[in-house]
Image: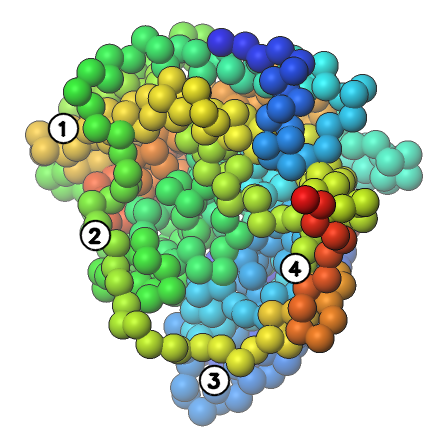
Amino acid sequence: MSVDTKTVKRVAHLARIALPEAEVERMQVELNAILGFVEQLAKVDVEGVEPMTSVTPMRLKQRADVVTEGDMADAVLANAPISDDHYFVVPKVVE
Amino acid sequence: MTELIELSLAEARDGLEAKRFSASELTRAHVAAVERARLLNAYVLETPEKAMQQASYSDARLRRGEARPLEGLPIGVKDLFCTKGVRTTAGSAILGDFKPDYESTVTSHLWRDGAIMLGKLNCDEFAMGSSNETSAFGPVVSPWLPPNWDRARARSTIIKATAEREVPQGLLVPGGSSGGSAAAVAARLCLAATATDTGGSIRQPAAFTGTVGMKPTYGRCSRFGTVAFASSLDQAGPIARSVRDCAILLGSMAGPDPRDSTSAEIPVPDFETAVSRGVKGLKIGIPKEYRMDGMSGEIEKLWAEGGRWLAQAGAELVDISLPHTAYALPAYYIVAPAEASSNLARYDGVRYGLRVEGRDVIEMYENTRAAGFGREVKRRVMIGAYVLSAGYFDAYYLRAQKTRTLIKRDFENVFAAGIDAVLTPATPTAAFGIGEKASASPIEMYLNDVFTVTVNMAGLPGISVPAGLDAKGLPLGLQLIGRPFDEETLFAAGQVIEDAAGRMVLPKVWWE
């Protein structure tokens, strides 16, 4: 299985990574090298095998539904590039 | 003062207790060593003031006879652990000047137990790499020199390369992703270091640098506050200069944590005691599938030698088969990037780290991530997005997860048949040169992890112990893989190998 440049651009958009036109072909070559390598998994007989969902047998723990932390808006915003009035500020979201 | 940094962690601990020196003296010696070793680029951030403050408090406690398990012992911290108030970068430009407002559980245990923080250690970006060459802070130089290189040549190569904004070609990689941790431990820039392992990132650099590295069972250490790469594979662990030192550090790092729902609610055993257990009566499996085409004669020989050492100590060697071994690496390179694409979605310029402006929010995300992520990270995030996308999920991700079940089942069958631990080589080669694999396909770099990824895929514990030197005088390691939550057997068997191989003689200082 290999990807064409159209797919590379689509995937870059899915991953929200800007990919300049000049870089597309190199990325295509590299992604195809990786996809070529993982192709050998097609040889594995996975008939009747469950996909692994948990690497050690464990039931997902649950905790009591109580508030344990909070009231730390300043700490949460401390590393923000731009914030205002306890909001993270970003450029407009285009419809 | 230089002799203090040559001590093992256990010796330093004993020395402090016997009042042969103070925590402040021990820390000052390490701070000075770190300062003089900047050519290696092992530390991305030095924290000497904090270290001396901690040392002073440790001395007060030592005087009062209230020493905690790691009291006064200087440790290096891989820059993948969030340290409160101290910049944490994950080896990336995208976190910018991020200073976490919280402490990772693993490092909180270190400070709870009285350890001293010397600084944050260099690593591959977001733990993605096997040579520490993908770090936004530049490569780490291994303290091990290639044959026939002298001090002058090594120093001038680094200085010239730095001035020309090039990498110091010819010098060796320490392995990765925990290259900074391994190099710092080997160069005596800390008594031991914390690290993480997703596909081999503790064990491979330990093997490359002649140090001991343990990746515990998945769930043994909490992942809270540890920058996530692949959540079903990541695990924190120690790198140190001896098996005993590793056991001591793991004892502090480990433990259940309500803030990590995947952490195992199992008490932490006394790992240090297990070190002297010996291996009498244990069954050690030798898997035939780890004998790969083109494997170097030296590594085969060392592997056989390791088996003999364990047998001489009373273990029984058993030939075993782990049939799906060869599929672990390709399955890993689907599962890990898929999980990474999800975990790295948070780096979007909104709440922390680097922000590159855009006309709208989508452009901001795309520009920020394009500028902030390095090549390898971009590759893996994109492979991950692709294999999870509609139409490809079944063919890739689901199939890889089924393969993973088979890989784990191979080990379960072998353990059910009475095997206590599995002995394999740690890496296919010794350390290679910085920049040597730059023009090769990404796959060439991935092949470094061929012996180590199976262990993460199965969630098992694994340790790498230095076992000898190759013909060029570079370290080679042997790996032991254990039953779930049986790190104690690995420490016991690791100690037998360490005793038989003799303590690794680490490189004399050339980097000051």
Which chain does the residue under circle 4 lie in? B
| Crowd rating for badge 3 (residues with CA inside 10 Å; few <14, some 14–19, many 20+) | many
Give the image location of residue B403, x and y in percent: 29, 23
Question: Nearer the viewer's eye, disc 2 or disc 3?
Answer: 2
Residue B305: image x %, image y %? 32, 25
Amino acid type, callout 2: Arg
Where is mark 4, residue-wise? B351
Q: Are marks 1 and 2 on the same chain?
A: no
* Marks 4/2: CA–CA distance: 32 Å
Task: Judge whether residue B421 can be spotted in this image.
Answer: yes
Q: Is residue B486 left or right of residue B49?
A: left
Q: Nearer the viewer, residue B199 or A21?
A: A21
Helix or strand or loop: what does disc 4 sit on? loop
Question: Circle 4: is it few (<14), some (14-19), or many (20+) Cα within 10 Å?
Answer: many
Give the residue displayed 42% in from the left and 81% down from the top. B67
Residue hosting label 1: B413
Query: Tag 2: Cα neighbours inside 10 Å, few (<14), some, or many (≥20)?
Result: few
Q: What residue does disc 3 label?
A: B62
Label 1 environment density (alpha carbons within 10 Å; few <14, some 14–19, many ≥20): few
Q: Secondary structure at mark 2?
A: loop
- Tell me the distance, in whole angstroms, between the alpha carbons under discs 1 and 3: 49 Å
- Label 1 residue SS: helix
The residue under the point 53% across, 37% down is B341
- Given the image, on which type of amino acid does mark 3 rest? Leu
| Amino acid type shown at disc 4 | Arg
